[in-house]
Image (cartoon, helix red, strand yellow):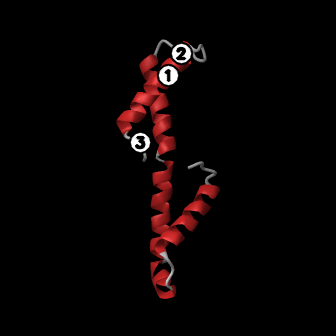
């Protein structure tokens, strides 16, 4: 993840404050809303990490073939990541 969890927590608190101040949401349970926003932001921001992990698993399965054919790992990583990003309709 590109951002620290502490910074994501800060962002969640600020987003919640702005939503309440702007009248977009009404709540008496601000900490609960902040926690939900924080969880949603962490989930979204960790998507790239999960995709990278899946790419590594896929490439590990083809490592012998890649070694035999002389395929470039970084190039294959980018191609597989691009395909998975399209598959999950993610914006990275």
Q: Is residue 17 above or below residue 48?
A: above
Residue drawn 49% across the image and 61% down it: 54
Question: What kind of element bears circle 3?
Answer: loop
Q: Nearer the viewer, residue 1 or 27?
A: 1
Residue drawn 45% across the image and 78% down it: 63
Task: Specify the label residue 3 is tagged with.
Answer: 3
Pointer 3: residues within 10 angstroms few (<14), some, or many (20+)? few
Q: Is residue 73 above or below residue 68?
A: above
Please name the residue that numbered disc 2 is placed on.
20
Measured Cα–Cα span from mark 3 to mark 2: 24 Å
Residue at the extreme left = 6
Q: Is residue 2 above or below residue 74?
A: above
Q: In front: mark 3 or mark 1?
A: 3
Total marks shown come to 3
Residue 35 can be seen in this image: no
Q: Nearer the viewer, residue 59 or 74?
A: 74
Question: What kind of element bears circle 2?
Answer: helix
> Dots 2 and 1: beta carbons under 8 Å?
yes
Disc nearer the start of the sequence (3/1): 3
Please name the residue that numbered disc 1 is placed on.
16
Residue drawn 50% across the image and 35% down it: 40
Pointer 1: residues within 10 angstroms few (<14), some, or many (20+)? many
Residue 53 horizontal side relative to residue 21, left or right: left
Task: Specify the label residue 45 is tagged with.
Answer: none
Residue drawn 49% across the image and 22% down it: 16
> Dots 3 and 1: beta carbons under 8 Å?
no
Residue at the extreme bottom = 68
Disc nearer the start of the sequence (3/2): 3
Measured Cα–Cα span from mark 2 to mark 1: 6 Å
> Dots 3 and 2: beta carbons under 8 Å?
no
Measured Cα–Cα span from mark 3 to mark 1: 18 Å
Residue 7 horizontal side relative to residue 18, left or right: left
């Amino acid at each position: 993840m590109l951002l620290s969890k502490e910074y994501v927590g800060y962002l969640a608190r600020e987003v919640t404050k702005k939503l309440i101040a702007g009248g977009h949401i009404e709540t008496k349970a601000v900490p609960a809303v902040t926690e939900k926003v924080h969880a949603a932001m962490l989930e979204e921001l960790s998507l790239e990490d999960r995709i990278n992990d899946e790419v590594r698993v896929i490439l590990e399965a083809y490592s012998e073939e890649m070694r035999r054919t002389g395929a470039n790992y970084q190039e294959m990583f980018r191609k597989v990541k691009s395909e998975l990003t399209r598959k999950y309709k993610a914006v990275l």
